[in-house]
Every structure is written in C-alpha cells, then in structure tokens.
C-alpha cells in the first residue's frame, strides 16, 4: 500500500549559475546583467525574477542579450509578459545553436562562444534540457525532467554522433533531484496512470447525468497530455478559465482537450485547495452537481509498488488522489546519472551525494524498473 504520510518537500528554484560558463544564468532571473539567459520551463520555481522590471531594464540596456527558450515556453512567457517577446530566442529541439557571450571585464570574463542544444525534458509544456558545450567542457542541465530508463537511448542528442549506442561524455550534470530523498523509489508510467484515471472519470460521469469532475493540479502548466487523453478517450473537453484559455487557443494543435465553452462543462480545472469547497471560483453558474474531486500529485505517495493502482479513494468516493509525477522517481533519477557517469553531479533542490552512484550500483536490485509493456489488474 502506498503511504500518504510525508513531510513537506522544499521545492526551490535553481541558483542560476553554471560554474563552467560564467556570465550566463539558467532558470533564475534575479541575477541581472548576464550575457545570456536560459529558461527550461515556466513553472514559478524556475522563473524567479523573469517578469521583473529590473530584468527588462537590463535586457534593454545590453544589446544582443537574450533569453533562450523552446517554442512553447516562448508562447507562455509572451502570454505572461508581452514586453519580453523581443528578447526571446527560440531553440529548435536537437539543433545545436551558437551563442556569443560578451566580455564582462568587471567580472574577469572574456568574450567567448558556446554551443547549446535543447533536448525534450518530459516534464511540462515546452520543457527542455540544455546541453552546453564550450571549448573544453560538456555540461548537461536537465531542468525539471522525467525520462524513463527505457527511453534514454531513444534520444539522439544523449549519444555520440560516431556511435549512437555510446552516451555522450559529460563533465558536469546539473540535475533535478526533487524525489532523490525520501521513499519515492518508483512511480508508474504516466500513460498507465492516465489509463486508470480516464476509466474512473468515465465511471463517475456515466453513473449520473448530474455528476461532474474537478481536476486539481499541482502546477499551472504541465497537464496538457492529461487533458488531451481525456478528450481522445472520452470525447469530453476539460474546461479552463479565460486566462488559461487565452494561452491554449494559441496552440490548438498541441492542446486539443480543453474548452472555454460554459455550456459544456462536466470536467474542469479546479482552483480549490480542498475538495469540500464549492466550485464557483472555477465554473461560471456552477450547478448543484455531484463532484468527484481528483487531485493529481506525487508528493504524498511513498513506498509505492508498480503492482498497485495509482490512486486512493477518500470521502465516501468523492475524492480521488492520483499518483501522477512529472519528475523522475529516485530509481529513474539514479539510472539516468549512472547511464552517463558524469565527472561531477550537481543536484537541485536536493544535493546529489558524489558517492550515490557507487552505492546504488551495488544495490540496483532494490529498484524496480518498468518493462516496455506492462498490464496492471485492479
């Protein structure tokens, strides 16, 4: 049985500095007057200072200083603060891009050129990793990510151009360690969790025409695949408010499972923190309906087994806690590090012990990895 008792996990943003490349800043925009900025995704713990007037002033003063992002991340940033649009440079996935870094005499930093390649991170809408290459160093910054052990080899940019079976040599890896500590050794694949979720939603909606579903999410963005799958399987779109709709309508091919039509609301994104609150904040003209409150999160799930169903029903069946993770489990995380065996590992928000790889290699049998095909029975 998965335990639902867990102490609070402190999620802090990355400090921003890549030691091997002074002059740039990643996922932290409180440090101004940099040569270049890089944003991996738009969750708030990675956008500190991004929308500040101080950053905007600095970008205006320093010619040819940009924020490098993915296409989807650019749309989100523009949506949040349109004035930043002209300072965004979109990186195409898998295409190495040269970035000129100006000299900064006040910090003893010389002008140089680096190469950066964006790689999908599998975390949220538009999220990507950054593979940095200098004259003598190769650095991978993962940002928040989730990639299963079975999928690492599918990524061309993780491997040598001369030998696609040979992992790239990394001097340093800056890696998301959200679930390194504690008892989060395994999480079920998100696709399999969605199988369970859509089945439960269908069952609830079919039971009574007055039944509704409230989806409570752990972040503003990152659940678009859930919306899309609900629509594909149940032919029902998820209602979102005007502000979120104004963004999603700009990417109709990417987010097909949402609507802003008030006449067709049986499932909506819920902004209530607690399941017993009314839904007038979320749904216009909220009817006297019977709600199934669904909380998608991985924080409270400890000591899970891959053989279990990934949800827990509460409150006489009107609340469903679902184990849905957009971060690697501990076993996925350690496998990722061991696959590359970088010279140095820097973890955030939790430190990554330099002895971790050796210790885990001796105990890999303690971890469970998902096979390529697996069926679960309830």
Image: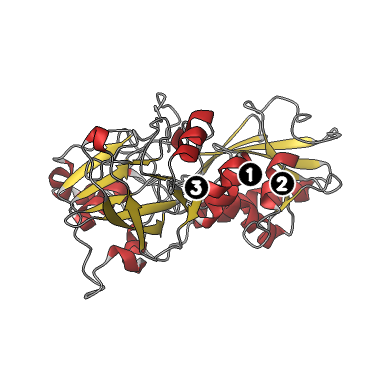
Whichever of callouts 2 and 1 sits on the residue coming sooner in the sequence is 1
Whichever of callouts 3 and 2 sits on the residue coming sooner in the sequence is 2
State the count of labels: 3
Q: Does 274 sit above or below residue 358? A: above
Marks 2/1: CA–CA distance: 8 Å
Instruction: Please report the residue visible at 40 percent of the width from the left and 51 percent of the height from the top.
Output: 146
The residue under label 2 is: 246
Marks 3/2: CA–CA distance: 35 Å
Q: Is residue 241 visible?
A: no
Q: Which mark is residue 369?
A: none
The residue under label 1 is: 79
Callout 1: SS: helix
Marks 1/3: CA–CA distance: 37 Å
Task: Choose between 206 and 182: the one closer to the eye.
Answer: 182
Instruction: Please report the residue visible at 75 percent of the width from the left and 30 percent of the height from the top.
Output: 279
Q: Which mark is residue 309?
A: 3
Quarter of the figure with the N terminus: top left
Q: Does 29 sit above or below residue 261? A: above
Q: Is residue 323 left or right of residue 288?
A: left
Q: Nearer the viewer, mark 3 or mark 2?
A: 2
Q: Residues within 10 Å of mark 3 (few under 14, many from 20)?
A: some
CB atoms of marks 2 and 1 within 8 Å: yes
Q: Residues within 10 Å of mark 2 (few under 14, many from 20)?
A: few
Q: Nearer the viewer, mark 1 or mark 3?
A: 1
**Residue 278, position in %: x, y?**
75, 26
Callout 3: SS: loop
Instruction: Please report the residue visible at 50 percent of the width from the left and 39 percent of the height from the top.
Output: 60
């Amino acid at each position: 049985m998965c335990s639902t008792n867990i102490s609070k996990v402190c999620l802090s943003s990355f400090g921003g500095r890549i030691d091997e490349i002074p002059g740039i800043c990643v996922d932290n925009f409180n440090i101004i007057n940099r040569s270049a900025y890089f944003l991996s995704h738009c969750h708030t713990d990675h956008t500190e200072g991004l929308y500040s007037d101080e950053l905007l002033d600095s970008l205006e003063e320093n010619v040819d200083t940009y924020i490098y992002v993915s296409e989807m991340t650019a749309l989100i940033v523009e949506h949040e603060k349109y004035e930043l649009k002209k300072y965004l440079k979109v990186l195409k996935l898998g295409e190495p891009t040269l970035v000129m870094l100006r000299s900064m005499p006040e910090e003893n930093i010389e002008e140089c050129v680096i190469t950066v390649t964006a790689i999908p991170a599998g975390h949220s809408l538009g999220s990507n990793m950054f593979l940095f290459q200098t004259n003598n160093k190769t650095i991978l910054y993962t940002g928040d990510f989730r990639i299963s052990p079975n999928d690492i080899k599918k990524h061309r940019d993780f491997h040598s151009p001369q030998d696609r079976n040979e992992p790239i040599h990394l001097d340093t890896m800056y890696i998301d360690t959200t679930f390194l500590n504690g008892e989060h050794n395994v999480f079920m694949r998100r696709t399999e969790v969605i199988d369970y979720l859509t089945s439960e939603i269908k069952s609830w909606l079919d039971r009574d025409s007055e039944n509704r579903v409230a989806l409570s999410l752990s972040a503003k963005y990152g659940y678009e695949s859930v919306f899309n799958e609900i629509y594909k399987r149940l032919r029902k779109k998820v209602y979102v408010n005007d502000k979120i709709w104004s963004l999603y309508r700009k990417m109709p091919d990417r987010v097909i499972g949402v609507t802003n039509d008030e006449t067709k609301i049986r499932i909506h994104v819920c902004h209530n923190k607690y399941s017993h609150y009314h839904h007038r904040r979320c749904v216009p003209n909220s009817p006297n309906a019977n709600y199934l409150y669904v909380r998608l999160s991985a924080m409270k799930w400890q000591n899970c087994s891959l053989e279990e169903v990934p949800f827990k029903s509460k409150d006489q069946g009107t609340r469903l806690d679902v184990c849905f993770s957009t971060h690697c489990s501990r076993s996925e995380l350690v496998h990722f590090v061991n696959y590359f065996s970088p010279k140095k590992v820097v973890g955030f928000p939790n430190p990554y012990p330099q002895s971790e790889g050796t210790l885990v290699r001796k105990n890999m049998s303690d971890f469970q990895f998902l096979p390529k095909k697996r069926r679960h029975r309830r």
